Image: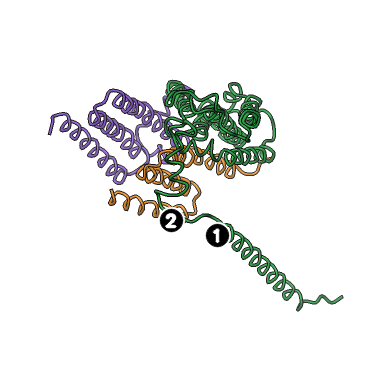
Amino acid sequence: MPIRLIAAYFLMITGSAFAIVTVLGLLRFPDVYTRIHAGAVVLTISAVLVTMGTAIYVWDFFLSAKIILIGIFFLFSNPMATHAIARASYKREIALPKEYEIDAYSDYLGRDV
Amino acid sequence: MEIPTETQPEVESLNKLMKKTLISVVLAGVAFALYQNFSLMPGYEGLNVGLSNYIIESGLKDTGSLNLITAVLYDYRAFDSLGESTVIFGAVSGIVLILSRKMLPVSSKGLSFIVKRTLGIMTPFIALFGLYVITHGHLTPGGGFQGGVILAAISIIFSIVYGSAFDYRRYSPQTKTALETGGALTFLGLGLAGIFMEGAFLHNLGFLTAETGTLISAGSIPYINIGVGFKVGAGLAIIFYSMIQKTFEEDF
Amino acid sequence: MAVLEIILVVFLVFSALMAVRFDEELISIIFLSIFSLILTALYLLHKAADVALAEAVIGAGLNTAIFMSAISQIRHGDSD
């Protein structure tokens, strides 16, 4: 087996492990914001790792470039969507942020808006 | 005056029975008509004989389109595609007639600064992908319909993320109506050109064919793709735009 | 290949049942979106790229947005 395939499989397996960690976090965390945290951080790196592994696996210039473009799209879009969801759930007071002792975002909103 | 209390439920139940009988008769009639229609269809003859084999063998030679599905949709069965476009036009007209109340919608401030900046970077690429899917419909998977829906997604993004007033300023309903009508007229004009040049409605225009695999080949199929794409995109954008007029007022 | 197809079909039926079963409209819409996504994967597995593209764009993208705006209008009440 050439070393390129080994690197590709390593990246894909690492990405899949991060995806499993994401599912565990979604199931085990207590409320909305921590679940969103799991979905944002770990799922982004998982998708990027899997796309990088696929780009190494096919190893053709144009195909790899397209797949890496898809990975960059993930890198932009997933944190942005997560940010939008978290902000909307904060504004709608879905998970009662007053329960926490530290609520820095309300101070930020008081300064900004 | 005495009210006949006994007969009232009987009339009700009789009415219900009549209604049920009528519905059953209509359903049985529809089922019979569908069965007759099915029995008229030619039977399945296997992959290597019959109509599908004909299209697989001589579709490229007849139409010059590498994507055989686009060849069927916009050359062999182009009349059906014209009917589908008319159905979308009817749906758009109905929804606009029912739902649109005023010209200027209630504006919203849109989402936060981060989302606006990020989508400002990504939206040109979405538009480029939509145009690619439309114009390469005869070479790669895709076509007018799919690319048109991708273009309509841009209008949805504008309405949700930047507020509906931004969408109104960029692509006003007049512009969308002009685009939709232009697309439909392109389709019909190509059909009429087929009558005058080749002798049949929506016949593939032979003098437009070029070397197979290039961007402008396959006769009139790319132009029909472009027309259908703009028509579908503008129509679905009009549907979404007339549905959000009173919603998304809060700033999330 | 066959194992993947069986798993996808099972999840397809499951998501369709869930979409019918819940009373909350939002959950039904999310399950319909998941249904379209699994159907896209099945179409790609059977090498029907055109239909897969149409299903992904319309089912998972456009339908969700239009349904969301519709239920948002319902919940805002019938003010004029």
User: Up-down: is C8 above or below B252?
Assistant: below
Q: Position of residue B229 (x, y in %)?
A: 54, 30
Left or right of B198 on screen, residue C51 = left
Q: Position of residue B188 (x, y in %)?
A: 64, 32
Quarter of the image holding residue B78? top right
B223 vs C21, nearest the viewer: B223
Chain the render paints purple:
A
B165 vs B238, nearest the viewer: B238
User: Up-down: is C16 above or below B209?
Assistant: below
Q: Position of residue B121 (x, y in %)?
A: 43, 20
Q: Which residue is mark 2?
A: C17
Q: Tell which subunit mark 2 falls on.
A: C
Tint of chain C: orange
User: Up-down: is A53 above or below B20?
Assistant: above
Q: Residues within 10 Å of mark 1 (few under 14, many from 20)?
A: few
Circle 2: element type = helix
Chain the render paints green:
B
Circle 1: element type = helix
Q: Which residue is mark 1?
A: B39
Front: mark 2 or 1: 1
B65 vs A56, nearest the viewer: B65
Q: Tell which subunit mark 1 falls on.
A: B
B16 vs A28, nearest the viewer: B16
Q: Position of residue B26 (x, y in %)?
A: 65, 63
Q: Which residue sits at x=49%, y=41%?
A: C64
Q: Amino acid at mark 2?
A: Leu
Mark number for residue A61? none
User: Up-down: is C20 above or below B62?
Assistant: below
Which residue, as the protein is rendered here, is positioned at the far bottom? B6
